[in-house]
Amino acid sequence: MTNLIPKSHPRAKSLYIREQLVHAFDDGLVAKEGLMAHGRGEAFDYLIGEKTSKSAKNAIKAAAFALVCAKHPVISVNGNIAGLCPKEIVELSKVVNAKIEINLFYSSDKRKQNILRTLKKNGAREILGVDKKNTTRISSLDSARRIVDKNGIYTADVVLVPLEDGDRTLALKKEGKKVITFDLNPLSRTAQTADITIVDNVVRGIKELIDVCVKMQKKNLQNIAFDNKKNLAKSISEIKNYLERRAKLA
Ligand code: ATP
Ligand code: MG
């Protein structure tokens, strides 16, 4: 399948990412709805010029600071994340000493097991969210979506929830968690609700996040002034500027 995308294609990287997600769907990691969520993300990636913007870099610094300083950081993993960047999730969890918890919007034991296997193959040791004996509920959410691990999201102070749904983000906020997200849509409810929103493709941004965490740990930590609303406004004006430049080129 990869041969179908020549390296010279102007959107080769984006098409590789799409192909990776399709493989992850075929391997039973990603839900059908996850493919659609990816399509929504692709559209916004197009609008930001498929590169990490200045506002995303700001948010990455703030996110790294929050993760490095957290007492109980947790990375919440769904099918799309497991399909797109399992190696980086495991690496980040080791760098900032965060727990990994599988938490699915469309819950399925089979998919959880497939995700578990993929994360283990990529070096994860402990993975939460799979042992039903350790689960509890967070309020203000219905059905399976409110089930979390007692030693994971339930006790976390900082939670990284990439590509998350707005209802869950809001529920985590109500539980007093500091929420960090990757979301290509600066207008989504998750983007607007989180404490720190990284408007970037998680495949690009997570590598930068790991690098910044490592650098911060080596140096003396500096507190970073960060206002999510202002930063989101900046990312929206970056989209506007990019579109205006494109329109002039056309
Ligand atoms: P919300 O529930 O927050 O209002 P939504 O209902 O539009 O958002 P969801 O399916 O709940 O969307 O969440 C998935 C989010 O992940 C979308 O905002 C989508 O743009 C974003 N997304 C998809 N793929 C990526 C990616 N590779 N990197 C970053 N964000 C992505
Ligand atoms: Mg949603």
Image (spheres, rainbow, N blue to C red):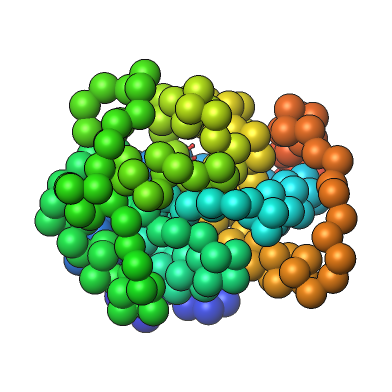
Q: Quadrant of residue 240?
A: top right
Q: Is residue 26 left or right of residue 125?
A: left
Q: Quadrant of residue 147?
A: top left
Front residue of 105/66: it is 66
Q: Is residue 95 visible?
A: yes
Query: In the picture shown, does residue 81 fall above or below 191?
Result: below
| Outermost residue, left side | 110
Front residue of 22/117: it is 117
Q: Is residue 222 left or right of residue 103?
A: right
Residue at x 49% of width, y 44% of height: 156
Residue at x 21% of width, y 26% of height: 143
Q: Quadrant of residue 216?
A: bottom right
Query: In the picture shown, does residue 233 fall above or below 116?
Result: above
Quadrant of the frame with the N terminus: bottom left
Query: In the picture shown, does residue 231 fall above or below 119?
Result: above
Front residue of 22/71: it is 71
Residue at x 55% of width, y 65% of height: 97
Q: Position of residue 199 (x, y in %)?
A: 64, 44
Q: Is residue 187 visible?
A: no
Q: Position of residue 111 (x, y in %)?
A: 18, 55
